[in-house]
Image (cartoon, rainbow, N blue to C red):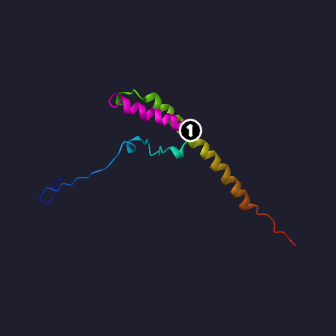
Amino acid sequence: VVAVDGTRNTSVIIINMNSDDAMSWGGANLSPHLHTEECNVLIAQLKQCHKEHNVLKFFGTCNDFDRAMRGCLKKEYQEKRTKSRIHAQEMQQKLSHPPKPIES
């Protein structure tokens, strides 16, 4: 980077990443406690494929595992979304029609 006054300004940014940081796709956290057993198996298979084929993974060797994992994560997301929508509708119903107070 060259500043307006002609001096040279440089900066170095160091990012510490481990192998698990690189294994999250599209912002999805792949921690095991967040997913079903089915998706955890697929995540483990994809990680294993990437470990075994550290160069060939860039040429599509692990794409089938990746597609299966993404499909599973999408299914999980849709199920959580549906469950949340149902819960929100129930809560709206409770708020718009509160129970009548009990008279003694």
Numbered circles on residues, count = 1
Q: Is residue 78 above or below residue 9?
A: above
Q: Which residues are magenta?
A: 38-56
Q: Residue 63 placed where, x, y %?
A: 43, 29
- Left or right: residue 49 versus residue 35 is left
- Seen from the viewer's position, the closer of residues 29 and 103 is 29
Q: Is residue 54 magenta?
A: yes
Q: Residue furthest right?
A: 104
Q: Amino acid at mark 1?
A: Glu
Spot the residue most to the bottom: 104
In which quadrant will I find the C terminus? bottom right
> In the image, is residue 40 part of the stretch drawn in magenta?
yes
Q: Residues within 10 Å of mark 1 (few under 14, many from 20)?
A: few
Q: Name the side, left or right, on which 39 lies relative to 93.
A: left
Percent from the top left, x then y, of residue 38?
56, 36
Name the residue at 63% across, 50% down.
84
Instruction: Please tell me whether residue 7 is drawn above or below residue 29 in the rendered image.
Output: below
Residue drawn at point x = 46 percent, y = 28 percent: 64
Left or right: residue 70 versus residue 1 is right
Image location of residue 39, percent across then percent down: 53, 37
The extreme left residue here reads: 6
Helix, strand or loop for disc 1: helix
Q: Residue at image x 47%, y 35%?
A: 44
Read off the residue under disc 1: 37
Magenta part, dominant SS: helix
- The residue depicted at 71 percent of the width and 54 percent of the height is 90
- The picture places residue 89, in percent across and down from the top left corner, at 69, 53
Left or right: residue 99 compared with residue 39 = right
Q: Is residue 56 above or below residue 43?
A: above
